Amino acid sequence: MNPTPLSRRTLLTGAAATVIGYNTTTRTWATTDTPTRGRITPLPPIQGTLTTNPTTRNTHAHDFGRLTTNTPYAVLHPAGAPDIATIIDFARRNNLKVAMNGQSGTGNDLESHSNYGQAGVAGGISINARALNRIHTITPTNATVDTGVTWAQLTEATLAQNLTPPALTDYLHLSIGGTISIGGIGSTVHKHGLQADTVEAIEIVTGTGRILTASPTRNPDLFHTALAGAGQVGIITKATLKLVPAPQNARILTLTYTDQHTFLTDQQTILNDGRFPSQVGEILIQPNGQPPHYKIEAVTHYNDTTPPNPTPLLTGLNPTTTTITDQTYREYTYRADTFADTIKNLGYWNTPKPWLSLFLPATTTPTFLNHTLPQLTPDDIGPGLLLCYPFHTNKLTHPLAITPNEPTAYLFDLLAFPHPTTNPTTHLTRNRNLYNTATQLGAKRYLVGAIPHMTPTDWQHHYGPHWTTLTNAKNTYDPTHTLTPGHNIFP
């Protein structure tokens, strides 16, 4: 639903005074209670609201990682794409920055789910994605939604029609726009690619304030650089996403290992023959310097009361132990909710989380693991996870979703929840050192992680031959570098 249109005078409100414009001389907001020395750029009319309320600004100042603070000047609650276009144009003329903030999560735990300030816009204008919350249509093959809709909201709506998005993140309470802007990885990446690879069309507001539709056949260069493009060319406001029939049930085979080589070999076997629609690997760091344990969670689906025979599913695999459980498809899809509730109950949800997300070449994954795992302790990870599983890189179809130059890569996802009293600086230094080692082995980063001190040279090395693709798109669609400064790709 769109908010009731506001009058020009109530466009932007602060704690006690109405903001009438932006003072380009003092680079502060001009209000009815402050002298108007200098040049004042009047605020244009919008249908939503733009606020300087300190409480609202503070809720958009931090993200899930809790490692940075980037307080915006103001927060926009848009009624639609035209409001965003208006504010981007206003920001360009006044040398302000703009970024979308997913405000993901549940209940009162709403925030950007970036990890290291990627959605931050210190001294700029933050856009609250939650205001864009409408599911427009659901058909047997696709859904069109506002990008502030979460994957949980879309999944609930589609399951009611026996449909599902083919690619889902493990944690569903994330904005659709946020994940497709950086890729969106989950346990079906080996089948369907990233969530960005399941997008059929987008509505996007570029950094020049234009509202455009983009698809593989309409503005294809914009389509392919907006998806997994880190918000550098525009703010995606609407998306049409593929849907597939939803299975009824899930059979989960949990395979454990004490040997890394066997763990990786079995993961490669499962990947190559495609026997499971969902595949996740996990590394379990042991106390007192003991060798790690390993786990594969492999899932198959079925639609009747008779689950599939596990014997052929396990052919050619060599786990130490195997455990089999059955759930409804919905229960498995929402499995991370229980994990999140546990983290919250333990008091770790709002503490610093120095995550590290990398794409490792399959050929050098053992070398990286042998270098890295001895450096990690159970306290480093806390109640979090260390995921490690493979996918074929040709499943990622957008050029700015950068992967190693090999047919197969492994996601290395250190989802650390260190003890709340831990100094995160040590972990950030470790992340940077591990990133340096990984890149020497041909790895690339996945953009949600916390890697400090990324330089222009680092980014050029990351994008490699696609650096030209990104810079050309930036110069075309955001020539004033107004959008999404938090990645620090274009300082």
Image (spheres, rainbow, N blue to C red):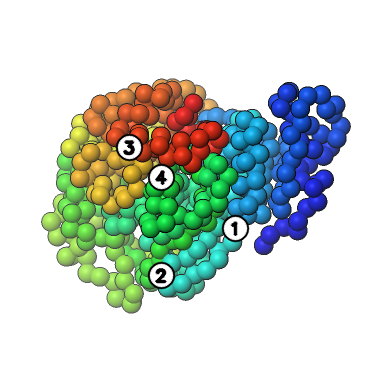
Q: Nearer the viewer, mark 1 or mark 3?
A: 3
Callout in the foreground (3, 2) = 3
Residue lying at 47% horizontally and 65% vertically, measured from the top left:
143
The residue type indicated by label 1 comes to Asn
Spatial CA span between label 1 and label 3: 33 Å
The residue wearing badge 1 is 133
Residue at point 38%, 58% (across, down) = 217
Q: Contact (CB < 8 A) between labels 4 and 1?
A: no
Identify the residue position indicated by label 2 in the image.
141
Residue 345 in the image: state x and y as whole percent: 55, 45
The type of residue carrying mark 3 is His
Q: What residue would you read off at disc 4?
A: 225
Mark 3 near mark 4, Cβ–Cβ under 8 Å?
Answer: no
Q: Is residue 225 visible?
A: yes
CA distance separating discs 1 and 2: 21 Å
* Residue matched to label 3: 466
In the picture, measured across the screen, residue 117 lies left or right of residue 471, that is: right
Give the image quarter of residue 59: top right
Sequence order check: which comes first, mark 3 or mark 2? 2
Check the image and name the residue furthest to the left.
316
Sequence order check, earlier mark of 1 and 3: 1
